[in-house]
Image (spheres, helix red, strand yellow):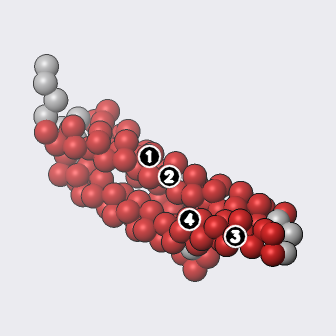
Amino acid sequence: MAEAPLEKKIKVLMAASRRIQKEYLAYKNEIQQYENIILGIEDNEENALKLKKKNELLVESKSMLPNTFQRLEENNQKLMDQVVELGMMNEELTEQAQQCIDQTQLFLNQINPAMI
């Protein structure tokens, strides 16, 4: 039996929530790695180019956090809207989607937007 378009959309949004959360964590990990590398590089003429490049990568990774946070918030809102539209037509999917929404909201709440 083919999935209803709304059910398929909800599954796509749930998968997107998981993917965006992983993406956010990857950027955070990348930032930590670059910061550790930069701290380990001696500040001398020989390492100036290396230090500059690592700083550029660090700034780029940091700039992605607000965007990723915003995309996750927007995706979670879309998922909430779709779940309301689905109602109780598919109780199992509604329950899975609600768990995803709750987990995503918890993830978002753990992030301090001022620290992004």
Q: Earlier in the sequence, mark 4 or mark 2?
A: 2
Query: Looking at the rendered structure, which numbered label has been put on residue 23?
Result: 2
The image quadrant of residue 43 is bottom right
**Crowd band around label 4 with a 10 angstrom C-alpha radius: few (<14), some (14–19), many (20+):** some
Q: Earlier in the sequence, mark 3 or mark 1?
A: 1
Residue 97 in the image, given as x and y percentages of width and height: 35, 44
The residue identified by callout 4 is 61
Q: Earlier in the sequence, mark 3 or mark 4?
A: 3
The residue identified by callout 1 is 19
**Crowd band around label 2 with a 10 angstrom C-alpha radius: few (<14), some (14–19), many (20+):** some
Q: Is the residue under label 4 in contact with that under label 3 (CB below 8 Å)?
A: no
Which residue occupies 69% across, 70% down? Answer: 49
Q: Residue flagged by tag 3: what amino acid is it?
A: Leu
Q: Quadrant of the N terminus?
A: top left
Mark 3 against mark 1, which lies toward the viewer? Answer: 3
Mark 3 against mark 4, which lies toward the viewer? Answer: 3
